[in-house]
Image (cartoon, helix red, strand yellow):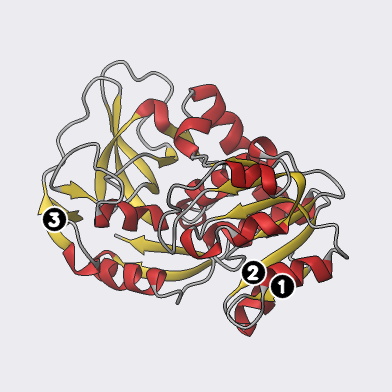
Amino acid sequence: MVAAVRVHKHGGPEVLTLEDIEVPAPGQGQIRIKQHACGVNFIDTYFRMGMYPSPVGMPFVSGNEGAGAVTAVGPGVTDIKIGDRIAYVVPLGGYSAERLLPAERAVKLPDSISYEQAAGMMLKGMTAQYLLNRTYKVVKGTIVLIHAAAGGVGLIACQWANHLGATVIGTVGSKDKADLAKKNGAHHTILYRDEDFVAKVKEITSGKLCDVVYDGIGKTTFPASLDCLRPMGMFASFGSASGPIEAFNINLLQTKGSLFATRPTLNHYAAKREDLMKTANDLFDKVGSGAVKIPVNQKFSLKDAQKAHRDLEGRGTTGSSILIP
């Protein structure tokens, strides 16, 4: 029996319960790992609340990313062996001391990446990778707006976009978070609680506006985010921290400048094994070179998963949060 955090009914952080569960021997194509660190992400709250349906039914073990050492391999697994250090992003099962995992979704960690770094960056870092390189390809001179610039994806995306030569504008909720975003590559910050972010974007860009808006906030930043875009700019909505964006008249995109809008997810961008490996290896390269640092700013024990969710949803965190089993 191993400790895990399970959800038996949808609701607030209080539905996260620490229990002992049985982890069987790995089956066909599976590996078993002893986890050293588990990532905490906003998507975990969506599953907990029922905004996203659980693919495994109820009850389920919360969490979507982690890192650890392989303790057993099932039949048919040839490229991973006992003792390998791996990390992963897989829907659910993450908040656990040990777990089973499809071997094809596991990525071997370079020696230069620690378990804690990996658990703090696989989902957020690979999200930043595809957003900046595939959803809208950022190059030197691109003007980007990143909402929640001091958050988990935000701090990584700010560094990465800066590294690619972009002008980086970030919205943040406090002066402390503004300082943090600037230390992590944002050239300009906007205090969204005190300032009109559309007016500030117009001022910062001298009316040119942005090529792309990366928005993990959702309801409260829409449709104002569209007003930050130049004609034919891209609105990339990758999260719903303030609630989902509701149905809107698609003609809005035309009236605001023949805009593009997309709601991407890592599940699709890394669905093929080759895409998963390319995305992860690019992330490892950027972190290994020092171009992108992974700020793991909050660490909780597995039994404090409720507090981790409360802090995350209460905007009380910066950078990455992890659980230590």
Q: Residue at x 44, y 56 (%)?
A: 240
Q: Quadrant of residue 199?
A: bottom right
Residue placed under numbered mark 2 in the picture? 171
How much space separates mark 2 and mark 1, taking CA atoms?
Answer: 6 Å
Percent of width and height locating residue 113:
56, 50
Let me know if residue 142 appears in the view.
yes
Indicate which disc, 3 or 1, sits on the residue closer to the N terminus: 3
Q: Residues within 10 Å of mark 2 (few under 14, many from 20)?
A: many
How much space separates mark 2 and mark 3, taking CA atoms?
Answer: 34 Å
Cβ atoms at labels 2 and 3 below 8 Å apart: no
Give the structural element (helix, strand or loop) at label 2: strand
Percent of width and height locating residue 49:
26, 57
Give the structural element (helix, strand or loop) at label 3: loop
Residue placed under numbered mark 3 in the picture? 9
Percent of width and height locating residue 252:
61, 47
Percent of width and height locating residue 29:
30, 21
Q: Amino acid at mark 3?
A: Lys
Above or below, 291 relative to 137: below
Residue placed under numbered mark 1 in the picture? 189
Indicate which disc, 2 or 3, sits on the residue closer to the N terminus: 3
Cβ atoms at labels 2 and 1 below 8 Å apart: yes
Q: Amino acid at mark 1?
A: Thr
Q: Residue at x 44, y 61 (%)?
A: 241
Above or below, 140 relative to 185: above
Q: Amino acid at mark 2?
A: Thr
Cβ atoms at labels 3 and 1 below 8 Å apart: no
Indicate which disc, 2 or 1, sits on the residue closer to the N terminus: 2
Q: Nearer the viewer, residue 249 or 58?
A: 249
Q: Nearer the viewer, residue 59 or 227?
A: 227
Q: Residue at x 61, y 75 (%)?
A: 192
How much space separates mark 3 and mark 1, taking CA atoms?
Answer: 39 Å
User: Left or right: 24 with respect to 274?
Assistant: left
